[in-house]
Image: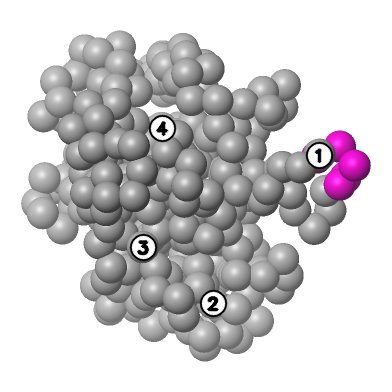
Amino acid sequence: MIYSKILSTGSYLPQRIMTNQEFAERMDTSDEWIRTRTGIAQRHIAAPDESSTDLAYQAARDALQRADIDPATLDLIIVATSTPEHIFPSNASQLQTRLGCQTIAAFDMQAACSGFIFALATADNFIRAGSCKRALVIGAELFSNILDWSDRSTSILFGDGAGAVILEAADEPGIHGSVLHSDGRYKELLLVPRGSGSAADTMGDRLPFVHMEGREVFKVAVRTLSGLVTELLEQQQMQAEDIDFLIPHQANLRIIKATAEHLNLPLEKVILTVAEHANTSAASIPLALDYGIKNGTIRRGHKLLLEAFGGGFVWGGSIITY
């Protein structure tokens, strides 16, 4: 039986840090208001000349260097992103060329904030099927380009960044299993209204920025994620006490706390980066995973539950042993 395991992780955050105080200086809000409702204190914002491919490249280099891996040994690259540099070619194909990986398969995956989970499960299945032995999976987002900076309800929530994971074939499971779901009925609650293929006559005067009905998204997310973690544990015949750490999508501290309470996990068992990174969409879970590994909180042998929820709606989770 072939499984996949995590060989190494990496991350990249743009140099510019934008604090809550910057919002308070130009709109009706405050640091306390933002922290109380979201748990966010700051976020990283990409430079004008940085693309989401650039962010992915830096995270990939970090993961490759930490494991002393030659990019030529990669068999597959998947980049999860909702903010690609181009409509096409994909970020992954550009990354494949920049890393010098020759003609291996490389493609992007769009599943909003759940994109990394979907990409991780896809790479895991490639390895389990024997189609590849080593895969690079990245979540990379440049959300600052699709925000209306005058909209207090959305602009305070997001940041830019990228996180990377290298998977390798193994005899014992690193990734035990994943659960993936979607429900397109909730489209209007969380979306970026226009893409190159949008039906302009149905979009009205909407601008191509993130639109979110925050209260409704919050309600569905809490309910959905509680069911998701139960489903994951049942699938793997595990109990909540078997999980060493929860690594949630870093969207909102209140949602994270609700999921932890459902698992009866204290916050000490939750990897939290929402205060420093804000919501980096598909990048948030790999960034948090890398953060936990680099600071020594997560060690080899720990069982981790990863979960995310995003626009679509799409949601998913994985249980892994690091």
- For marks 2 and 3, give the CA distance: 21 Å
Residue at point 20%, 39% (across, down): 31
Q: Is mark 3 on a helix, strand or loop?
A: strand
Q: Do the residues labelled 2 and 1 touch (CB within 8 Å)?
A: no
Picture coordinates of residue 174, whole percent (x, y): 35, 45
- Quarter location, residue 242: top left
Q: Tag 2: Cα neighbours inside 10 Å, few (<14), some, or many (≥20)?
A: many
Who comes first in sequence, dot 2 or dot 3?
Answer: 3
User: Image quarter for residue 261?
Assistant: top left
The residue that label 3 is drawn on is 45
What amino acid is labelled 2 in the image?
Leu
User: Which of pointers 2 and 4 lies earlier in the amino acid sequence?
Assistant: 2
The magenta segment: 199-203
Q: Residue 204 carries which label?
A: 1
Residue 172 in view (yes/no): no
Q: Does the magenta stretch include residue 95?
A: no
Between residues 75 and 251, which one lies in front from this camera angle? Answer: 251
Foreground tag (4 vs 3)? 3
Going from N to C along the chain, the mark reached first, 2 or 1, is: 2
Disc number lying in front (4 or 1): 1
Residue 95 disc label: 2
Q: Nearer the viewer, mark 2 or mark 1?
A: 1
